[in-house]
């Protein structure tokens, strides 16, 4: 606990590599578990079940924005913090959790009016319970992040997701329907709280420093505003589709979006988690920060862009293989969201830059424009169905280039560095997409099973991408070779 009070910049490279290693190991395991469990649940549940839980999530995610009000990011960003500040954030988060649980419970009585379906209200009456425990996760998360103990965080996250998956599948197998997803969510929160409290020896003291809360109000408000806009971007489509097109269409739409969101949630966001304290620790050394950003940005783009393009290219085989032929209506939606996920995830490194340099207010302004564009795209395309909505959101995702350029400018980088980070992986991914498209007419005659064609396209696309990227630049091979060498040296 004492070591967590001061951010250390010594041996930072090794600690970043260690953190990234466990983050990406966690990514692989969580992705396999998530895709596997979704494939199983898609056969045990109906599209409407996923649609109902998506409607309820619109309310719970809005409430979750208030759960810490950015207090945890403030504790991570500051070079020196005190135990009194930790106690203050703990009690503030706990009080907010109780209030939010009550708010979600009250909202459950209006769900019939909001979504035109009474079942959503019943779900919310149970899904309010995790908010009673959410305050208990704040300080353990802050301590692990400041110490960059990502190995411990890895085991917590893996244990949590495995338990959640087993509970959800078990309840679905018995026949609980949509309630199996609720049971998994409740179990996930409980396990995370128990493990976090077990590994971080933090016991809150009965004291509260109101001046600290007031002094951070402006920055906290910016964090909250950014979170609110992120919520709007992620949920306004669910609310409108659920109300206008019904639970079945929303089930197709949300399932497609959830799988492609894994690219950002399982790869880009964990890297943000590693780089935020790292960038904060080298604020006084811009040259070191630029080198760190360019290398991590290149590697992130080299990983997420081909995955997104690959999902888009193989959607006609991926959907029936994972979910069954009854989900074929979401193939075009999955194809569009794969491209959108590649664009957004490859530029996710901008977020830790804004946060580490305490420019949350600037990021908030860009998020306002992004939210307006998202709402406009959905409003204009909704009458034409979920495929048109997905196409509109792909176009809006190009706007992310603007805040990405601004974030790079905080450490003295410009447009040519955007090309150095994103350009070559994108060109190689386009070649990947084209190779799958050209191979499909021939492979359909040779291989009748969608799963067999999917395996062929994964191998073909992966080989084509790696070869093309290496021919365009050998810098990526050097980056990953250096990462592997440092990891082996650490071991």
Image: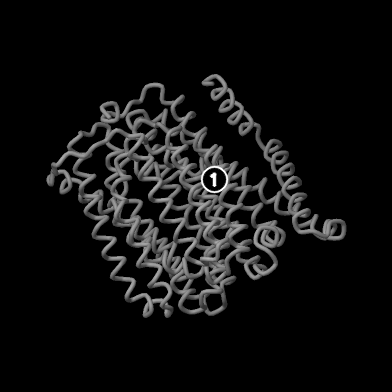
Percent x, y of residue 367: 38, 57
Badge 1 element:
helix
Percent x, y of residue 380: 49, 75
Percent x, y of residue 137: 33, 45
Q: Quadrant of residue 482?
A: top right
Residue 300 makes an appearance in the image: yes
| Residue nearest the observer in this picture, 314 or 428 | 314
Does residue 351 lie above or below 314 as drawn?
Answer: above
Residue at 27 percent of width and 65 percent of height: 103
| Residue nearest the observer in this picture, 208 or 238 | 208
The answer to whether residue 437 is left or right of residue 355 is right
Q: Which colour scheme appears in the figure?
A: one colour
Residue 347 makes an appearance in the image: no
| Residue nearest the observer in this picture, 203 or 90 | 203
Does residue 126 lie above or below 160 as drawn?
Answer: below
Q: Residue furthest top?
A: 489
* Total tally of numbered discs in the picture: 1
Does residue 185 lie above or below 12 as drawn?
Answer: below
Residue at 66 percent of width and 52 percent of height: 310
Task: Check the picture and name the quadrant holding the N terminus.
Answer: top left
The answer to whether residue 250 is left or right of residue 3 is right
Does residue 2 lie above or below 197 as drawn?
Answer: above
Percent x, y of residue 436: 75, 54
Residue at 54 percent of width and 45 percent of height: 30
Q: Quadrant of residue 47?
A: bottom right
The answer to whether residue 251 is left or right of residue 70 is right
From the image, tell me which residue sits under label 1: 30
Task: Check the picture and name the quadrant holding the C terminus.
Answer: top right
Q: Residue furthest right?
A: 446
Using a 10 Å C-alpha cutoff, classify the residue at mark 1 as few (fewer than 14 neighbours), some (14 to 19) or many (20 or more): some
């Amino acid at each position: 606990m004492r070591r967590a009070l001061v951010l250390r910049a010594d041996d930072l490279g090794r600690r970043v590599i260690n953190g990234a290693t466990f983050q990406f190991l966690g990514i692989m395991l969580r992705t396999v578990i998530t895709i596997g469990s979704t494939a199983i649940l898609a056969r045990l549940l109906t599209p409407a079940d996923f649609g109902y839980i998506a409607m309820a999530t619109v309310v719970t995610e809005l409430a979750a924005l208030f759960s810490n009000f950015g207090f945890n990011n403030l504790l991570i960003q500051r070079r020196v913090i005190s135990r009194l500040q930790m106690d203050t954030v703990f009690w503030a988060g706990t009080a907010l959790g109780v209030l939010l649980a009550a708010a979600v419970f009250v909202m459950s009585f209006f769900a019939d009016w909001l979504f035109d379906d009474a079942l959503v209200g019943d779900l919310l009456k149970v899904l309010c319970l995790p908010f009673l425990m959410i305050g208990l996760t704040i300080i353990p998360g802050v301590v692990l992040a400041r110490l960059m103990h990502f190995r411990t965080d890895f085991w917590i996250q893996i244990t949590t997701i495995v338990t959640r998956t087993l509970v959800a599948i078990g309840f679905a197998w018995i026949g609980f329907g949509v309630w199996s997803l609720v049971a998994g969510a409740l179990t996930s929160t409980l396990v995370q709280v128990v493990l976090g409290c077990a590994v971080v020896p933090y016991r809150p003291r009965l004291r509260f420093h109101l001046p600290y809360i007031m002094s951070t109000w402006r920055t906290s408000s910016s964090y909250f505003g950014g979170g609110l806009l992120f919520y709007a971007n992620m949920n306004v489509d669910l609310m409108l589709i659920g109300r206008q097109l019904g639970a079945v269409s929303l089930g197709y739409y949300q399932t497609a979006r959830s799988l492609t969101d894994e690219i950002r949630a399982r790869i880009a966001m964990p890297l943000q988690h590693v780089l935020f304290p790292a960038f904060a620790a080298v604020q006084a050394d811009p040259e070191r920060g630029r080198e760190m950003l360019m290398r991590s940005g290149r590697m992130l783009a080299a990983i997420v862009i081909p995955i997104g393009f690959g999902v888009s290219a193989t959607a006609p085989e991926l959907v029936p293989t994972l979910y069954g032929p009854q989900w074929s209506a979401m193939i075009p939606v999955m194809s569009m969201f794969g491209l959108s996920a590649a664009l957004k995830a490859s530029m996710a490194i901008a977020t830790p830059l804004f946060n580490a340099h305490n420019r949350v207010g600037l990021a908030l302004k860009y998020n306002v424009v992004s939210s307006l564009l998202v709402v406009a795209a959905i409003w204009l395309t909704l009458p034409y169905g979920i495929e048109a909505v997905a196409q509109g959101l792909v176009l809006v995702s190009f706007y992310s280039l603007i805040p990405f350029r601004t974030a790079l400018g905080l450490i003295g980088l410009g447009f040519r560095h955007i090309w150095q980070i994103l350009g070559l992986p994108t060109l190689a991914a386009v070649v990947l997409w084209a190779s799958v498209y050209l191979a499909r007419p021939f492979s359909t005659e040779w291989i009748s099973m969608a799963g067999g064609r999917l395996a062929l396209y994964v191998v073909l696309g992966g080989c084509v991408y790696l070869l093309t990227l290496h021919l365009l630049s050998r810098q990526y091979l050097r980056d990953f070779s250096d990462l592997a060498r440092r990891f082996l040296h650490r071991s």
